[in-house]
Amino acid sequence: METPQAHPRGRTGGRTGRYRSHHARRHSAQRRPCHRRSATRRRAGVARLRRHPPAHLAGGVPGDRCRLDVSRDRAATHGTIRPHHRPKDVHVGTLLGRVEALQSGITTLLDWCHCTDTTAHGDAALDALCQAPGRSVCCYGVGIGTAGPVAAELARMRGQVPDDSALVTLALGLRGPQITSMETTAADVAAARDLGLRVSMRVHVRSGAAQGRRPVAALREHGLLDERTTFVHGNGLDDDELTMMADAGCSVSISPEVEPKMGFGRPETGRTLAAGIRPTLSIDDCPSAGGDMFSTMRTTLSVQRGRDTVHGRPPSLTARDVVEFASIDGARALGLGDQVGSIPQGKQADLVLLRTDAVTFNSMYLITRPSRRKGWRRYYCAGIPGLHNGQRPSAQQSDPACVQ
């Protein structure tokens, strides 16, 4: 899927899916007034880093699991259930997860796809993302559970997703030094760099592998850190490792609901900020934590405020910070910061329209509070609208020229 092309006169135009000048918007509004504009407020679309859409097939099965259950449940999920997943199961789970994310107001999703036992499984996940509306990054977790080379398979998949400006793009989900050798990790990173792909890897010090105690330091020694690297979780990393990540321009994706529940440790939002890293937000395991990014934003703010209070220090996090974590900071971590994540003229029109006629919305803080489909009215992706108050948009609402 390709994004709409820019207007010949510049990056603005009524049918390009991009934000236009105030003058152009004013005249368009006279021709095509949008429904109840006075009762909505625009905000940049939400970007979620790391999610496992196929997990929707599990429903609420792992909803009660905690740290003591993680090893047992992981063995059951990956050792018993996963081998029975057919490509069409992966397709259905990915499609359901992507649509559910959109209905929660998430316009951009990184699908950390590691149910890739065969090439057909990987193709099924990619096909589902291409069929679903919205902007998606297929983070291809090829080779998970093995130590074999992945360069050839990654190149094959890159051939299917060659355009980094399309609505569906590709990244590599690294096995990483905590579940495989450093030599394998270095080869995986080199394969991704040769293909111009960003990489994402799961890291926290409770993994217990040979390089599990200081994984970031080990990666730095091998020259594997740069601005195209995103670390997921990062619980318990040493202060100097966070500094290494900041110096290299790496990004961090925090899952504040999953991490304490599964025993990874406390979310490191405050520590990453102190190290000079703007974190991003992810949900990770939807059956366990739910798929609503607004809830994740609330949890992020509440947990960090609680830690600041316990230690007798002023708040290190504001509501505006959390909104930026879920929008522009997430877009930058995906390499999309020049396209989405904020709403200046010329960027792609990825929007979530929030209700301002409800008593639950009256400040920046309350932006983090809308519940599913009750606090927001409509979303747009590249100027193309999705659900309007839970319904398909009318022909007039589907016109990109209505983006105001």
Image (spheres, grey):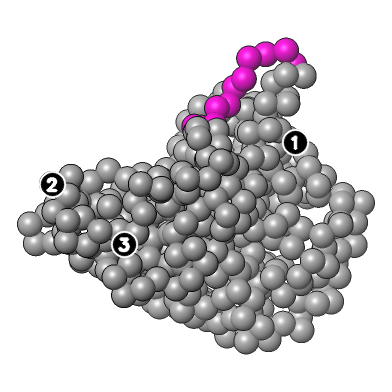
- Is 313 one of the magenta-colored residues? yes
Residue 55 is at least partly visible in this image: yes
Query: Of 156 and 279, which appears nearest the observer?
Result: 279
Left or right position of 395 against 31: right
Q: Amino acid at mark 1?
A: Arg
Query: Few, some or many C-alpha atoms within 10 Å of disc 1 (few <14, some 14-19, many ≥20)?
Result: many
Q: Can you tell which of label 3 and label 2 is closer to the viewer?
A: 2
For label 3, the residue is 383
The percent coordinates of residue 62 (x first, y second) are: 82, 63
For label 1, the residue is 266
The percent coordinates of residue 404 (x first, y second) are: 27, 52
- Is 355 one of the magenta-colored residues? no
Left or right position of 46 against 174: left
- Residue beneath the point at 42% across and 52% down: 353
The earlier-in-sequence mark between 3 and 2 is: 2
- Residue beneath the point at 68% across and 86% down: 86
Please identify the quadrant where the N terminus is shown. Answer: bottom left
Q: Which mark is residue 23?
A: 2
C-alpha separation, residue under disc 2 versus residue under disc 1? 48 Å
Query: From this viewpoint, which residue is outermost toward the left?
Result: 9
Q: Which residues are magenta?
A: 311-321
Report the predominant secondary structure element of the magenta stretch: loop
The percent coordinates of residue 338 (x first, y second) are: 31, 48
Query: Of 136 and 169, which appears nearest the observer?
Result: 136
- What SS does tag 2 mark? helix
292 up-or-down from 80: above or below = above
Q: Amino acid at mark 2?
A: His
